[in-house]
């Protein structure tokens, strides 16, 4: 299955695109704000380079080295 995401803030355009998809026999779904955020978060996870992550042990050493006020 292939998918396409089209971004628009115009509700009229969204309705037109949804209607066009239905006339073409395609399924469509308008994403909620939460679904859009989930997609964006997923993309960020994919882009994460694990080599850039701080090891837990290194983080603890750094935290303990900070002066407390």
Image: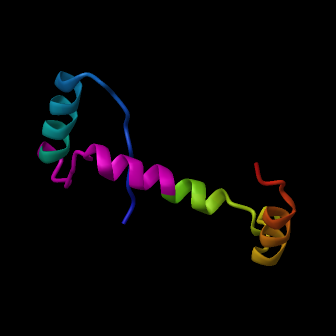
Give the left or right position of residue 22, taking residue 7 as reference: left
- Asked where in the image residue 20 lies, by quadrant, the reply is top left
Q: In this view of the protein, which residue sits in the foreground, 62 or 7?
A: 62
Q: How is the image coloured?
A: rainbow
Q: Is residue 40 magenta?
A: yes
Q: Position of residue 62 (x, y in %)?
A: 84, 63
Residue visible at 15% across and 32% down? 15
- Asked where in the image residue 17 lies, by quadrant, the reply is top left
Q: Is residue 37 magenta?
A: yes
Q: Quadrant of the N terminus?
A: bottom left
How many labels sit on residues? 0
Give the left or right position of residue 21, taking residue 44 as reference: left
Q: In this view of the protein, which residue sits in the foreground, 69 or 24?
A: 69
Q: Position of residue 44 (x, y in %)?
A: 58, 54
Give the left or right position of residue 7, taking residue 16 as reference: right
Looking at the rendering, the stretch of residues picked out in magenta corresponds to: 23-41
Q: Position of residue 2 (x, y in %)?
A: 39, 60
Q: Position of residue 69 (x, y in %)?
A: 76, 48
Above or below, comparing residue 65 to residue 7 in the picture: below
Taking the view exactly as shown, the residue that stands out farthest to the bottom is 57
Q: In this view of the protein, which residue sits in the foreground, 58 or 15?
A: 58
Residue visible at 31% across and 50% down? 34
Above or below, comparing residue 64 to residue 38 in the picture: below
Residue visible at 32% across and 52% down? 35
Residue visible at 27% across and 47% down? 31
Taking the view exactly as shown, the residue that stands out farthest to the front is 69
Above or below, comparing residue 37 to residue 11 in the picture: below
Give the left or right position of residue 67, taking residue 29 as reference: right
Above or below, comparing residue 33 to residue 45 in the picture: above
């Amino acid at each position: 299955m292939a998918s396409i995401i089209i971004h628009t803030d115009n509700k009229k355009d969204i309705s037109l695109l949804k209607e066009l998809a239905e006339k073409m026999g395609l399924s469509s779904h308008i994403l909620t704000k939460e679904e859009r955020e989930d997609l964006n978060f997923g993309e960020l996870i994919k882009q994460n380079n694990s080599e850039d992550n701080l090891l837990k042990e290194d983080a603890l050493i750094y935290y303990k080295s900070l002066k407390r006020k």
